[in-house]
Amino acid sequence: MVEPDVADGVRELLDRGRTAYRRLAWADAFAALTAADEQAGLPAADLELLANAAYLVGRDAVGRDIRARVYRGWLREGEPARAARSAAWLALLLLLQGEEASSNGWTLRARRLVEADESDCPALGYLSVLEALGRLRTGDTTGSLSAARSVTAVGERFDDPDLVAFGQLGTAQALIEGGEISRAMEMLDETMVAVTAAELSPIAAGILYCAVIDACHQTFDLRRSLEWTAALSRWCDTQPDLVPFRGACLVHRAEIMRMRGTWSDAVDETREACERLTGHPAVGAGYYQLADLYRLRGELDHAEAAYRQACRWIPDPQPGLALLRLAQGQGDAAAAAIRRALDETGSDVGRGRLLGAAVEILIAAQDLPGARAASEELRAIAGRIGGPWLHAMSETADGATLVAEGDARALRTLRRAWTAWQELGAPYEAARVRVLMAQACQANDDPASAEMELDAAVLVFEQLGATADVAQAQARSRDHAPASTTLTERELEVLRHVAAGQTNRAIAADLILSEKTVARHLSNIFSKLDVSSRAAATAYAYEHDLL
């Protein structure tokens, strides 16, 4: 048998790898291009595709090594400007993965090449991306804004969509830090047009998705957060082999689930995200989210462990850690932690995240002047930033402070807060407001209304699994009603799909869950309804008007 020509074999692998890359089949692209590289070293352009594919399938260390070869390959091919661009891209990826020293080294290499070549090139834009990020991290908002605008200018000059998008993102981030929220969000909307239209490279698109959703969370813009999280989920689903951004997608989805009250699903999503993000700085946000969920469910030991994990990546995970101390009965420690966090935070966005928790903690510590000052500051920030979530937080903080001060206006303020949370679809926050409303009713000698508010709050807390809140609400109630076996909102959703005759796999696809999670919900439904089959559960549901 005659062996086929080696060159023909390499050419076939190259064609297969390039085709797979265009189809976003990252694992196939990585395998084919790796095989071609092993048989006859790839030129710099194909090595760049291989480096990108390695990153997108989660082979970070391999991808870094290959990207360093890309840099050297462009130098050998007499392309210093492209070598500088490769070095700057590697510096950016290293920085985003928390490897600052290595990032600095590659930044210096890129800058030295640009200075030696003395020519205008796209690498200048990528160096400005790094400068904008560095200045933003040190609080130099003006410098960061100037660098970001330089990125956009270079991108437009060289018709580089990635650079234009990075420049717009950096400009928006600097505007957010400067308190110009409305302008920033408009710019991000424009940026996302390029992302959703598939005008960017895959890695740039993933970075933009995650950064824009983070900006939405920072500015309490729930509507945009929901929209872009759904878009990110769809984008990830088109690339089954994708690794680095899928974990971040799960974290963002879990945050939405927590807000919407499907806590068990949120825990499952966050645990999977933490597994996928192991070793990546973004895992800190995953552990923080998981810790918050454990705290809300009253699993304080698990919450403590998760906050400690988050601390490895987030220096001071607040306000969650301070609220945990309050739940643990360490009121003084909680007050000290939240005061220190506020002292160290200057921006409206950062303080807005802390002040609602500060009001709760300072009221518990009987520091009513401090709680009043925090509430008034939160109201002022809500007025400047806007957004229904922040306004709902402000109304809640004001109402809680009025209750603590014994002010008769509390109930009117709290009704506005409850309406705001209801409109946002945030059941836990709305239920906590009802507990405050019960306190206001009790203070106004209206125990019957107080009992009604507490009963309504307990029902929601039970559905969510907020055991500590159930206990606290029942402690305020005269009746001390036992916990119910009501199905949660998510369990009712699953039951509706079961009644429609769908399989676990079909239900998982419709509700964007894993089959394992659907099976767990089904087991809980069987247990609560005391049935042993899907048919019996369906019959029970129709008999008791659950559907």
Image (cartoon, rainbow, N blue to C red):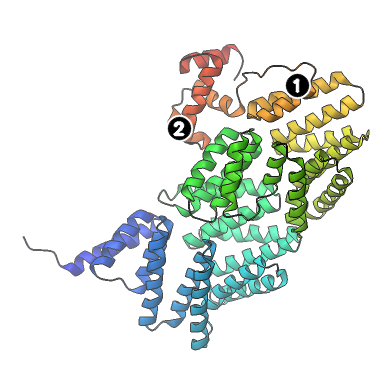
Residue nearest the observer in this picture, 29 or 475: 475
Q: State the residue at coordinates (67%, 70%).
A: 144
**Earlier-in-chain disc, 1 versus 2:** 1
Q: Which residue is mark 1?
A: 455
Q: Amino acid at mark 2?
A: Lys
Q: State the residue at coordinates (40%, 55%).
A: 57
Q: Is residue 388 visible?
A: no
Residue nearest the observer in this picture, 451 or 196: 451
- The quadrant the C terminus occupies is top right
**In the displayed structure, does residue 202 sit left or right of residue 147?**
left
Q: Which element is circle 2 on?
A: helix
Q: Which element is circle 1 on?
A: helix
Q: Which residue is mark 2?
A: 516
The x and y percentages for residue 445 are: 92, 22
Residues at marks 1 and 2, CA–CA distance in whole angstroms: 33 Å
For residue 479, above or below residue 405: above
